Amino acid sequence: MNVDTIREFCLAFPHATEKLQWGDDLCFKIGGKIFTIVGLDNPRLCFKCTPETFAELIEREDIRPAPYVGRYKWVMLDRIDAVDWRELRELIQRSYAMVAAKAPNAGRKENKRDTRKKRATPAKSAVIRNRPARVARKKGNSGR
C-alpha cells in the first residue's frame, strides 16, 4: 500500500475530490469537507472515526489523535502501514460516510446549478414586456 493506492481508493467514492493544502497534504473531500488527508513528503494519514474506533486506534503503536482535530475523533497514522490495507479501506470508507452525511452540499452542488431556473435581469424583463406592445402597435398602424 502506498499514497497512489490510497489516492485511487479515495477518489473512487461518489463526488470525492482532492486538493493539495498546507504544503504537502493531499486532502480528499466530499461536499467541501475533508474525509481523509495523506501527507506526501512524509507519508502519514489522517481520517475521522467513531468515538469507539478512535479509543481503540490510539492505543496502537504509530497511531495518535490528529493534531488540531483529535478532539473531533480524527486519528493520525504516523506510518501508512500502521494498519493493514483491508482494515484501512474500511476505516476510510467509514470516514467518508460520516463526513458525507454532514456535508452541506455533498454531491448536490452540481445538481442545484443544473436545475435552477435562470431569471431575466430587470432590464431584460422590461425590454421583453415592452416588445410585444410595440409589435402590436406597428401591426395596427400598418393596417390603416
Image (tube, rainbow, N blue to C red):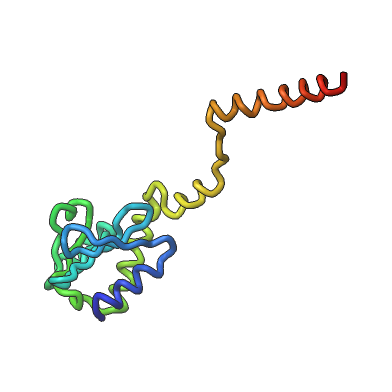
Q: Quadrant of residue 38?
A: bottom left
Q: Quadrant of the N terminus?
A: bottom left
Residue 42: in sight, yes or no?
Answer: yes
As drawn, the residue found furthest toward the bottom would be: 1
Q: Quadrant of the C terminus?
A: top right
Residue name at image x 54 percent, y 42 percent: 116
Q: Quadrant of residue 50?
A: bottom left
Can you give x and y, in whole percent of width and height, for residue 49 in the image? 27, 60
Question: Foreground: 114 or 102?
Answer: 114
As drawn, the residue found furthest toward the right would be: 144
Can you give x and y, in whole percent of width and height, for residue 62 in the image? 12, 71
Left/right of residue 4 with respect to residue 42 in the rendered view: right
Left/right of residue 2 with respect to residue 31 in the rendered view: left
Residue 60: in sight, yes or no?
Answer: no
Residue name at image x 37 percent, y 68 percent: 11
Can you give x and y, in whole percent of width and height, for residue 111 in the image? 51, 51
Residue name at image x 24 percent, y 62 percent: 20
Q: How many marks?
A: 0
Residue name at image x 50 percent, y 47 percent: 113
Question: Foreground: 99 or 127?
Answer: 127
Position of 131 relative to 83 (above/below) = above
Question: Foreground: 63 or 105?
Answer: 105
